[in-house]
Amino acid sequence: MIKQILFIITLLITFGVFAYSVKRLWGFFKLTKPAYPIKNIGARISHTLNVAFRQTKIFRKPVIGLMHALVFWGFLVITLGSIEMVVDGVSGLDRAFAFTGWFYDVVIASGDVFALLILIFIKLFSIRRMFLKVKRFSGVEMTSKANWDAQLSLFFIGFLMVSLICFNMGYISSHPNAYEGVYPVSAALVNLFGWDFSWLQEPGWWVHLLLIFTFANYLPYSKHFHVFLSVPNVFLANLEPITKYPNLESITREVKLMLDPEAAYDESAEVARFGVKDVEDVSWKNYMDSLSCTQCGRCTDVCPANITGKLLSPRKIFVDLRKRMNEKGPLVIAGKEDNKSLLRDYISEEEIWACTTCNACAQECPIDISHPNLIMDMRRYLVMEESAAPTGLNVMFANIENNGAPWQFSPEDRMKWAE
């Protein structure tokens, strides 16, 4: 009974802290603009199963892709076992889901095997980060704090797997002749050593669940928040072709007014900002992309601008958006300003004009982030609000205005090339 009470108190504290983090992020989301409508639910479910659960984009790098996919699938299975542990803690039962029979045996056996595989892969991931110097793990946005954050998350995951195996070994030793479930790895370890591991059951159970609770409340402040948001982000992705850029509603409305002499202009309507200057101009999906970004660097790795030595790093765009929201969000909620902006103070004009809009980054991103859409919106702000386009573009704009085409020829001379 004491164990139940202590666990319920711990669980309530966990939910309370997590609710505070969610409330904080929800306040930031409310500062953003609307995005596209969420429809075609059937197509979204199919897309999510393909991209998020089958991990199809991850397998473009086959070896690392397989390792990452196994870690992801393993987490899904182990989560089922962790839910049972929470139910046991609240109810005082032991193995509350054992009534499902063969399904329970499959889930527990899979979780036991995956725990060992994940532990091995996490160690390999950590060594790879520390010693192999993979190019896409570097960059101005990958600060020492970001690398420390990645290693800490790997540490958490590794110890989660160790505590689970220890708990399983303790449970097997405590019930040598009649235990629920199948444990290929843990049972083999108990038999290999031949010791009594029953003392590990309670510490393993508590450590495993406390690590889960701590990790869950750490994630909203970590780059590994994608553990929670990657699947929803894929589900909410724009299903339009990645090369299709949305029109600005404010511009569309102005054009319709110009073409319809009978239309009345609504002077009470709020004058919208064209494009994106700061975090309150981005859409909720842009901000969700920044929270979901795994910072894997696959986008930057395939970016032709970055490859040829230009300043643009697609990953940095969304890392900067998240940083800026963390900085400005609390100020806006408190009714304050800091006289800074996402554009220029975080992201330079040189960066966004380096983009070729080839969409290689969006194609490669394993969680369907669309980097060029945000880059184009920042360009829209510069051109339409400040007339701050590069010289080459200004010449083209002038030609379109004067000649109805991007070239410096009058309409009367346009067919001379055919002669």
Image (cartoon, rainbow, N blue to C red):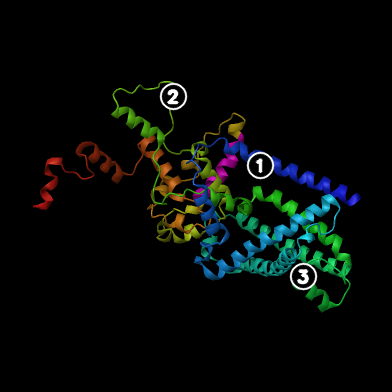
**Residue position for label 1:** 22
Crowd rating for badge 2 (residues with CA inside 10 Å; few <14, some 14–19, many 20+): few
The circle drawn on residue 170 is none
Q: Secondary structure at mark 2?
A: loop
Q: Which residues are magenta?
A: 316-330
> Circle 1: is it few (<14), some (14-19), or many (20+) Cα within 10 Å?
some
Which amino acid, by three-letter code, is at mark 1?
Val
The answer to whether the residues at label 1 and label 3 have Cβ atoms under 8 Å apart is no
Which residue does the numbered mark 2 point to in the structure image? 269
Percent x, y for residue 328?
A: 57, 37
Answer above or below: position of 169 versus 257. below
Query: Dot 1 lies on which element?
Result: helix
Disc 1 versus disc 3: nearer the observer? 3
Left or right, 392 with reference to 417: right
Which of these two is toward me, 167 or 290? 167
Tag 2 or tag 3, which sits nearer the N-term? 3
